[in-house]
Amino acid sequence: MSGTAEEYLRLALRLGKHLENLVDSYYGPAEIAEQVEAEDARDPAGLAEDAARIREGADSPWVAAQLTALETAARKLAGEEISYQDEIERYYGIPAEWIPEERFEEAHRKLDEALPGHGSLAGRYQAWREGDTLSGEPLARVVESLAAEVRRRTVERFGLPPGESVDWEFVNDEPWSAYNHYLGNLRSRVEVNTDTPLNPAFLVHVVAHETYPGHHTEHAWKEHLLVREQGRIEETLALNGSPQSLVAEGIAELSVEMALGDEEFEVTAEHMAGTGTTYDPEVSRAVKEATEDLRAAGNVAWMVHADGRPLDEARDYLMRWALTSEKRADQSLRFISDPMWRSYSITYIEGYRLCKAFVAGDPERFKRLLTEQLTVADLR
């Protein structure tokens, strides 16, 4: 057990007493969590100093990068003014970049060709996205059948440690579509937000993202190999707002492609049989290709937190360029406005880009992402 790793865990748990959702999950030594829980809350400025001190003696680049993120969070909590751009650089190890609207315009052009029907592009896209959704018992049934499908393919392509498992729960009133709670001992509990309409094209992405070969698979492999076999206890803590979360979201965003490849749309159609949906695999394929660059949330977060623009203007921007409904735009703004999550949308955009470029379609390189402690610098 590394002394630096133990100090890192204590620091993260101490800071987590101030910042809800900073620590996404922890299954490490119980005595560490118990000791921190019994302590009085420590001064954020002192925690920032601790992070800098521990980083000086860090025995791995991965831990050092995580400590930079923790120091930044502590300094912000202590009242230091840190710009949105600097926050992204220090949290995730990447520069903050504005996505030119020309890329959205090109996505709109492709989407206009992909979607059938008449009327405005936003209206047709929202009708496609919101009009053929699953809920209740059919939703649960399809989630479980898709999970079994992507799990089988994950076993074939990347393997899984023996004894892993996933449980599903259906919830509401959350700012996200789905969430993986990794419990340790190779187990996950995944919650699906039923307030968010999930059509088949998005549902298969959600299932793969949260489970196989996404978040659950990464957690399980790293617990099996890095924690149990190598004693790297720093991996027992998942830290939001850090390079670790950027890589994790990149893996998860890439997961459906790595599990299903070109068969994604035909496989989804098979699982939709008998649900009453009118899923069209060819339209879904064209829409996915068209919307790969339709990721405006990062710009919206920049508008709100870097430029100080009002939420109404940000909502209009999101509805215009992401072609979302007002309800879905409000849900995105709820996420972006949260102090913990305000810069997190970048992890999906840049994490996917970095992981996709690193993997370059090679399953063995994707397996490295699942099993090795790679840094953002490694990917770049």
Image (cartoon, grey):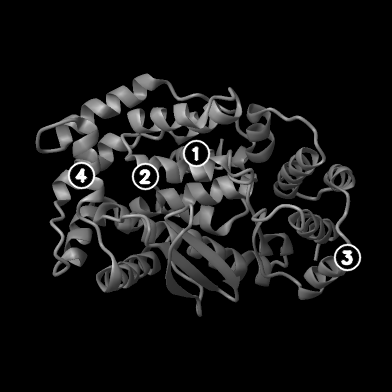
The residue depicted at 63 percent of the width and 27 percent of the height is 85
The residue depicted at 63 percent of the width and 39 percent of the height is 92
Label 2 and label 1: CA atoms lie apart by 30 Å
Label 1 and label 3: CA atoms lie apart by 39 Å
Q: Which of marks 2 and 1 is nearer the N terminus?
A: 2
Furthest-left residue in this view: 117
Q: Which of marks 1 and 3 is nearer the N terminus?
A: 3
In depth, the one of 53 and 108 nearer the eye is 108
Quarter placement of the N terminus: bottom right
Q: Label 1's element?
A: helix
Label 2 and label 4: CA atoms lie apart by 14 Å
Q: Label 4's element?
A: helix
> Residue 60, relative to residue 212: is it above or below?
above
According to the picture, the residue beneath numbered tag 2 turns out to be 327
Q: How many labels does the image show?
A: 4
In depth, the one of 84 and 2 nearer the eye is 84
Type of the residue with mark 2: Lys
Tags 1 and 3 touching, CB below 8 Å: no
Q: Which of marks 3 and 4 is nearer the N terminus?
A: 3
Nearer the viewer's eye, disc 3 or disc 4? 4
Label 1 and label 4: CA atoms lie apart by 32 Å
According to the picture, the residue beneath numbered tag 3 turns out to be 39
According to the picture, the residue beneath numbered tag 1 turns out to be 354
Type of the residue with mark 4: Ala
Q: For the residue carrying disc 2, how many other residues have a C-alpha within 10 Å: few (<14), some (14-19), or many (20+)? A: few
Type of the residue with mark 3: Glu
Determine whether, in the image, residue 320 is placed left or right of residue 300.
Answer: left
Q: Earlier in the sequence, mark 2 or mark 4?
A: 4
Type of the residue with mark 1: Leu
The residue depicted at 26 percent of the width and 52 percent of the height is 201
According to the picture, the residue beneath numbered tag 4 turns out to be 127
